[in-house]
Amino acid sequence: MRLGIDLLTRHELDGLLSRTWFRRFAFADAELAHAETLAADRGGEFLAGRFAAKEAVLKVLGTGLFQGVVPSHISVTRDTSGAPSVSLRDSASTAADAAGISHVTVSITHKRDLVAAVAVGW
């Protein structure tokens, strides 16, 4: 079992979120599509939470940002109950296999200007 955690401020990504290359690099299509259905401020908060979750998952996989796993290959969507659900593809799936990880789950929380995520892999 492996554990990863990440913490960032809600507005930490604002400059990057305005850049198309970053959005494509960091987020899966389903994440971007959901963010587009939200008001601008809530969409930014949503993507900050997803980014924190991806950073936590990268730690579970034993790698960091810009170290071989493309963040958009980690998708954090919602299951039928509304809880976050993680799916890995391409470079993220390869890293999980190499680390002996077959399942990953995350929890995301927002409080005022803070966003935190915890990931567990086994």
Image: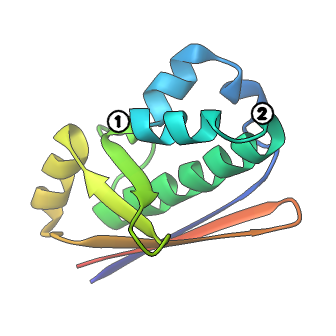
10 left or right of 28 in image: right
Say which of 16 and 109 sits in front: 109
At x 66%, y 50%, the residue is: 46
How far across and down, in percent of the image, does residue 1 sit?
26, 84
Task: Provide the residue designation for mark 1.
Answer: 70
How far across and down, in percent of the image, does residue 43 sit?
70, 42
Say which of 57 and 78 sits in front: 78
Q: Amino acid at mark 2?
A: Asp
Task: Provide the residue designation for mark 2.
Answer: 14
Residue 1 seen in the current view: yes
SS assignment at label 2? helix
120 left or right of 35 in image: left
How far across and down, in percent of the image, does residue 10 sit?
79, 51
Furthest residue in direction top, as rendered: 20
* Figure label count: 2
Judge the density around disc 2: few (<14), some (14-19), many (≥20) Cα neighbours within 10 Å.
some
Whole-angstrom CA distance, mark 1 to mark 2, is: 20 Å
